[in-house]
């Protein structure tokens, strides 16, 4: 399967250099997993996109067309990944300030399902990255187009024997993986970092929190200090491609417990069956 790109409902990969997404990173994106010809958790992705558009004051309203396009690109594909980008559209003048008259651009690309990690992901090693996330409550939680911190983190781990790295805030708190959300368990129970100052609130993170609530063991959302990693007995990361992925080594320390990850994975998968 070759990559396919639609821009505003047309099959093309040509984008104007005046688009504010390119000029300023002025937009949002979603990564959607598709299995058996169907996008998974589409309503949640579109709900998050609506919320992001409201926060950025981005006047995008083509949700019905977008829903149909996503469904069409997923159809007939056993497994694929769709990446959706919505920008504010073509700049109407120079400078950062938008006029309010821009027409948003929607970009939808279809990609092959990425190959699994070596050994079918039986080993999943994670360590803290030297790259830190800037703190900005105005953008915290949003999946906006400005991802240079994640690019730097991925570049820094290129030669390391790791599958993912953890990012700290500029204040030193653990926030997330470079492309995932993080869950940890110790004697106090299951918890995940608060994302009120930086980080992305992922769809799979939301699903895990909801599944844990239904199971009677809610996830505590709070600040997580780096030194707490030494006391963790189980840890896992989440995104829509990996699902719930257990960490087998955290900062070089083996973690053998995967009980909560397996239970939550089963609850989420049961809802999709």
Image (spheres, rainbow, N blue to C red):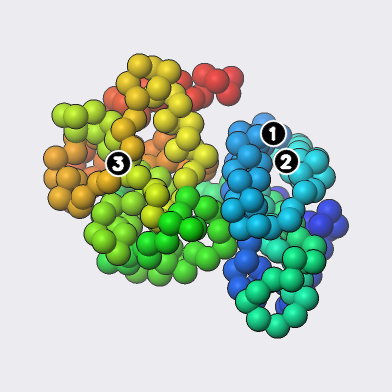
Residue placed under numbered mark 2 in the picture: 74
Q: CA distance from mark 1 to mark 3?
A: 34 Å
30 relative position to 205: left or right: right
Q: Which mark is residue 66?
A: none
Q: Is residue 138 visible?
A: yes
Give me the C-alpha separation between circle 2 and circle 3. 36 Å
Q: Tag 1 or tag 2, which sits nearer the N-term?
A: 1
Q: Residues within 10 Å of mark 2 (few under 14, many from 20)?
A: many
| Image quarter of residue 16 | bottom right
Secondary element at image label 2: helix
Q: Which residue is mark 1?
A: 38
Q: Eyeballing the image, is 188 above or below 21?
A: above
Image position, residue 30 (x, y; %): 60, 50
Query: Residue at position x 19%, y 33% from top?
Result: 186
- What residue is shown at x 74% (from left), y 53% (from top)? 60
Instruction: Answer few, some or many: residues within 10 Å of disc 3's Cα (few below 14, many 20 plus, some between 14 and 19).
Output: few
Pick whichever, 99 or 201, lies toward us: 99
Between the C-alphas of marks 2 and 1, the distance is 6 Å
**Measuring 80% from the left and 41% from the top, which residue is drawn there?**
64
The disc, 2 or 3, on the residue closer to the chain's N-terminal end is 2
Contact? badges 2 and 3 (CB < 8 Å): no
- Occupied quadrant, residue 234: top left
Mark 1 or mark 3: whose residue is earlier in sequence: 1
Residues marked 2 and 1 touching at CB (< 8 Å): yes
Instruction: Give the number of the disc on residue 222.
Output: 3
């Amino acid at each position: 399967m070759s990559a396919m790109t639609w821009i505003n409902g047309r099959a093309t990969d040509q984008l104007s250099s005046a688009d504010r997404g390119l000029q300023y990173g002025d937009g949002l994106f979603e990564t959607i997993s598709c299995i058996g010809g169907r996008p998974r958790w589409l309503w949640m992705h579109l709900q998050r996109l609506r919320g992001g558009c409201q926060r950025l004051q981005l006047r995008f309203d083509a949700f019905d067309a977008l829903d149909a396009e996503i469904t069409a690109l997923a159809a007939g594909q056993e497994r694929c990944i769709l990446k959706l980008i919505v920008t504010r559209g073509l700049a109407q003048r120079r400078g950062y300030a938008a006029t309010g008259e821009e027409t948003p651009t929607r970009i939808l690309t279809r990609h092959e399902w990425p190959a699994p990690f070596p050994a079918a992901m039986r080993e999943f090693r994670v360590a803290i990255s030297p790259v830190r996330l800037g703190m900005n409550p105005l953008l915290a939680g949003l999946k906006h187009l400005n991802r240079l911190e994640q690019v730097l983190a991925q570049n820094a781990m290129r030669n390391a024997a790791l599958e993912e790295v953890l990012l700290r805030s500029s204040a030193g708190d653990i926030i997330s993986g470079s492309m995932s959300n993080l869950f940890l368990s110790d004697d106090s129970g299951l918890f995940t970092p608060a994302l009120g100052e930086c980080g992305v609130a992922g769809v799979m993170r939301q699903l895990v929190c909801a599944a844990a609530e239904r199971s009677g063991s809610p996830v505590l959302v709070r600040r997580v200090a780096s030194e707490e990693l030494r006391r963790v007995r189980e840890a896992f990361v989440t995104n829509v491609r990996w699902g719930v992925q257990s960490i087998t080594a955290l900062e070089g320390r083996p973690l053998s417990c995967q009980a909560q990850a397996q239970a939550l994975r089963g609850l989420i998968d049961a809802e999709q069956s």
